[in-house]
Image (cartoon, rainbow, N blue to C red):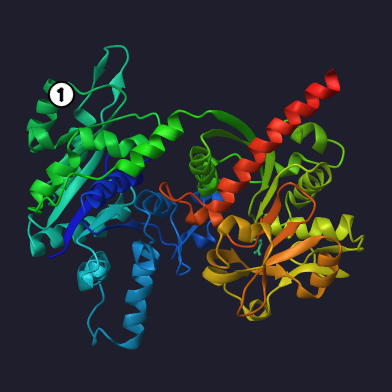
Amino acid sequence: MTKYIFVTGGVTSSLGKGIISASLAKLLQARGFKTTIQKFDPYINVDPGTMNPYEHGECYVTDDGAETDLDLGYYERFLGTPTSQANNVTTGRIYQTVIEKERRGDYLGKTVQVIPHITDEIKRRMKLLGQNGSHEIVITELGGTVGDIESLPYLEAVRQMIWELGNDNCIVVHLTLLPFLSASKELKTKPTQHSVKELQKVGIQPDILVCRTDHPITMDIRRKVALFCNVDVSSVIEAITADSVYDVPLLMRKENLDIVVINKLRLMDKREPDLKEWKKFLGRLKNPIHEVKIGLVGKYIELDDAYKSIYVSFVLAGAANECKVKVVPVHSEDLNYDNVENKLKGFHGILVAPGFGERGFQGKIEAVRFCRENKIPFFGICLGMQTAAVEFARNVLNLESAGSTEMEENLQNPIIHLMGEQHEIENKGGTMRLGQYACMLKKGSRALGIYKNAMIQERHRHRYEFNNEYREAFEEAGMMCTGINPDNDLVEIIELKDHPWFLAAQFHPEYKSTVENPHPLFISFVKATMVYKVNHTVRMAEQKS
Ligand code: GLN
């Protein structure tokens, strides 16, 4: 029988439900339980694909092409197993399904209502990943904060799940906050008591309270929270602010969160959690020998979450190289021909980020040119690759009016253009080239040397493509098309000859970097920046003497 764990949040948003869910999942997985995590988001968008990064942060993409919440990135990075469309459900998707059923006449003349029809659809999706024995434990993170109007149908669905499956098979972990009042120097429990009352009002008694705090929780506080919130003292878990999110699984282990869960769900404890690889990673992360500085050129730089997977991929690839990677965001709109050298000269490598639309495109072109001409390690992702292609066409092939038709229609030389089937598409949601596709790497290429495997699979999220009419001219001039989709001949990777490290990919390697398996392109790029730093320092010293 599959066991279900629901993770709710109280008092305030941004407490880190995603990290707590992923950490608990990691501990259970490390004990040998087949575990997955899903996120239910109470907004009306069918998926976050149509949302601006400023609204929602990065849109994470799964193998099967789902555009999802960035918490799924944490799930995959912590567990090392892929998620899918089923792992992220929104209110929009629930209503869409119910309304489609109503239009088909599936409800046989009944009045369609939030209860039972919406809650039934929520429950169906809550159980989906637990079917066919595919997972022993399904953790469901509920977005939002208890007390929100839009969360109510989800909480009602959770209440019904507990009633149907019993408290041995279904538990609720409530993440809450113990604020510290500096004037009286105490942790306060009242907000937690109120937020638990909100849950009790809708018929849910949380089984475990995970308390976010900046200060250790004393036994007195644990007892007080337990007494007033109606849980065991051992079920009051301290979640103290950690140095890094990667410490959280170990902190939760120390607090016995996994043991409490196992006991409540009456699971047979399989073994002690095997966290060897995790600890090795943490050791490297915390004791770097080297340090590099990489510029991340993009236009959503005000918000770290907009490039979450890229930042994290650098942390993971840095640890693999025993190197602290300092990623400094650079606003592409601030770059131009005259200032690019000044703005980028302190970096050991540059990554040009994915993105949409014209704003900041010219600045990205200047960043690419600077790296190409000065042999600075360059990594382009998605729009970053398209920019590298346009820069090459303009400044090396000297093609007039060369660009991407995303930025400008009626170009004389449309280096990047819309894919065939994209011309007919009108709806914006879920219609890009999404998800995992195969890519064949050319013999002798840098890419093949890095992947050590000629056929790779990578995830995509884009509408525009490299125009194959220019492939020959590019290769003759030294920009090699070294990764090709074997089914439709689309260019997936370009790399420059005679450059220490200049590679750009149409796909998103950052979505497939995990703690125990950092992405090889990121590892190799970081290595190249380390080499650049050494050579550059030597060069500077020689120039001085
Ligand atoms: N805007 C470009 C396209 O749609 C690139 C997308 C991206 O960088 N994710 O093709």
The one of 164 and 242 positioned closer to us in this rendering? 242
The one of 437 and 291 positioned closer to us in this rendering? 291
Rendered location of residue 89, percent (x, y): 36, 63
Image side of residue 73 versus residue 10, left or right = right
The one of 161 and 215 positioned closer to us in this rendering? 215
> Is 527 placed above or below 442 here?
above
- What secondary structure is found at the residue carrying circle 1? helix
Which of the 4 quarters of the picture holds residue 224? top left
Considering the image in quadrants, where does the C terminus appear? top right
Which residue sits at x=54%, y=71%? 437
Considering the image in quadrants, where does the N terminus appear? bottom left
- Ligand 1, image quadrant it occupies: bottom right
Would residue 329 be seen by someone viewing this image from the given angle?
A: no
Which residue sits at x=77%, y=60%? 389
Question: Which residue is under mark 1?
Answer: 221
Rendered location of residue 393, percent (x, y): 85, 61
Which of the 4 quarters of the picture holds residue 68? bottom left
Q: Residues within 10 Å of mark 1 (few under 14, many from 20)?
A: some
Image side of residue 408 versus residue 451, left or right = right
Image side of residue 444 versus residue 283, left or right = right
The one of 493 and 337 positioned closer to us in this rendering? 493
> Is 106 placed above or below 114 here?
below
Rendered location of residue 460, percent (x, y): 56, 65
